[in-house]
Amino acid sequence: MSRAIFDVHAKSFWCEAKNFNVGEHSVKKLKGSTAKAEYLKHLLDDLEALQRMSDQNMFESSPIRIGAEQEFCLVNETWEPAELAVEVLKGLDGRFFTTELARYNLEANLEPLSLSGECFSKMHAHLDYLMGKARTEAAKYGLKVVLTGILPSIDSRHLKKNYMTPIERYKVLDETIREVRGDNLELHIKGVDELNLRHDSILFEGCNTSFQGHLQIDVNDFANSYNWAQAISGPILAICANSPLLMGRELWQETRIALFTQSVDMRPSTFIIDQREARVGFGKEWVTGSIVDFFKDNIVSFPSLLTTDFDSASTQYLKTGRVPKLRALNLHNGTVYKWNRVCYGVTNGKPHVRIENRYLPSGPTTADEIANLMFWVGVMRGRPKEFDNIETQQSFKDIKTNFYSAARYGMATQFYWNGELLTSKELLLDHFLPMAYKGLYKLKVAPEDVEKYLSIIERRIMGMNASRWMVLSYRKLMENAKPTDALHRLIETMYAREQKGYTVDAWQLATPSRPRSKHKRKLVRHYMSTKIITAQHHDSAALVLKMMQWKNIHHIPVMNERFDLVGLLTWSDLDELSSHKNNLGESVIEHMKTDLITTGPDVTIDEAKKAMEDHGIHCLPVVQGKKLIGILTNRDF
């Protein structure tokens, strides 16, 4: 399409405060008294410059602009993450595309547009144009582009350091967070299933892909606008949720909320009561005061992590008639990840403030994403007068409860709203959709656009959102498939539907794929079982025997106190024990095999099968180092 409809010079609208401070390429750890003093001088000077610009009414209030950032996944022919993002990026336009933390993700930046007329259909056209470019370039490497909040096929392999994009700023932030925390990162998310992991990097964050929306706001109405953005977050998130699966587990309807929070949590696990707020979060209370007060509170709540090489002070820029970029303040703000983040920027020589919506997930289609953005913008701009000063009417804790309940339960959530307890369907249909229509028509957004995209939201409310579709499809696929095959088929279906242009409200549940003439390389990880009953080496052998009989289990791995694999018990090992009822005091260690034949997850299934045949065994524990991660038996073939 023609580039004439886009304002190329307004690209700085979003770039100052991206995730992991992408806008500031040269960053360093904030260490040493000299560096800290220099950074603090510029940070305080930035606050002074911000105050002066506010006092002098320099901030742009019109036209109102919207923008967006599209994060997306690269997958290979087996629908698993492909670590070729840097190579793919080389063939793409650097004005619009950039790296992400993980080597299987990229980001596209859409041109900001004035909020009027056909802005949403124009943004949709530009998004499709950029995604077409990305798909064409990815295809040169045999890859595909997938839009989803969390790629279901990500597993522990893809969280290793070699999957981190080899750019210095990512390495610096990773090292800084781990140094401040003083320990490895912990991940514990409990939904329908449970995931509990420890990891030595922030690559958990790389599992997340978002469609981040930007809306310019009037700095003179800052507190009202920001508090309203907070108030509506839960219901908006419920209908847009698209991330229910991580590593084959059903977790939250929008698992990104829990995953991102924990992946960059710098707070150590201690008994200290006076803990700081998490760097990723919803906030602790309603906002009061000005934009300057907001940034001051952030500085108080979150210690600075990074610095860079600064040039002239921001107040000096102002004296010469130029508008400063507030690099130190934006550097700090770039490492504070509020779900509704306040951003400062400069467009065409004028400063502005915008809210960055960080909770909207990527996918499942570009049409769904534009509909999500329009719905959010419409409700933001359609705020009824009665909700001015909402902090005097509703409890912040109720609003925060709404947000995390929506992340956990999606459209099954009941919301506290204006003194009532309403279902998602009631609140969205009877309250939020009318607000969105009113707000968009007031801004003279083209009626055709409004009807087209808000109809997508309405159909989704009456049917199901993307998270519910994924959960039901995965359960259906799991009836006749191993988890890995089910996850791959799920992604394949998502990709096929997205390519056809169907929005998720029209999707039928995924069905098993037909046999293919070309079989992909099958590995142990594709066949092994991960739901394993284990024993400890000091457990009663008699009790373990009973457990095996009760559950019809022929093999039980045995762990030591460090949860390392140290042995294996089989029915034949316990034959003698079963005939002597008085041997209740004997422990597992007296009966288990310790000379184990094991395999790794990336060994081919044919090699594993041959190993079992060669050694005359029916079970292979699957290990990484000394840790058991699965078990393969002859039943799995």
Image: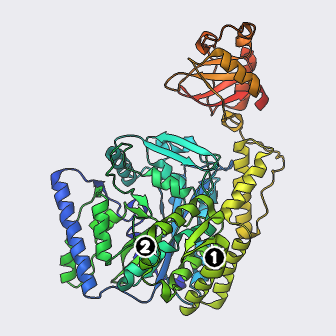
Answer left or right for 554 relative to 218.
right
The residue under label 1 is which amino acid type? Leu
Verify CB contact (< 8 Å) between mark 2 and mark 1. Answer: no
| Residue 254 point in image, percent of width and height | 58, 59
Name the residue: 57% across, 67% down.
237
Secondary structure of the residue carrying numbered label 2: helix
Answer left or right for 609 relative to 283.
right
Secondary structure of the residue carrying numbered label 1: helix
| Residue 558 point in image, percent of width and height | 60, 21
| Residue 181 point in image, percent of width and height | 35, 45
| Residue 302 point in image, percent of width and height | 31, 59
Name the residue: 71% across, 15% down.
615
Look at the picture and state if 427 lies above or below 64: above
Is residue 20 visible to us here?
yes
Earlier-in-chain disc, 2 versus 1: 2
Pointer 1 local density, CA inside 10 Å: few below 14, some 14–19, many at least 20:
many
Where the N terminus falls, by quadrant?
bottom right
Q: Nearer the viewer, residue 525 or 554?
A: 554
Look at mark 2 in the image and give the residue it sits on.
14
Pointer 2 local density, CA inside 10 Å: few below 14, some 14–19, many at least 20:
many
Look at mark 1 in the image and give the residue it sits on.
428
The residue under label 2 is which amino acid type? Trp
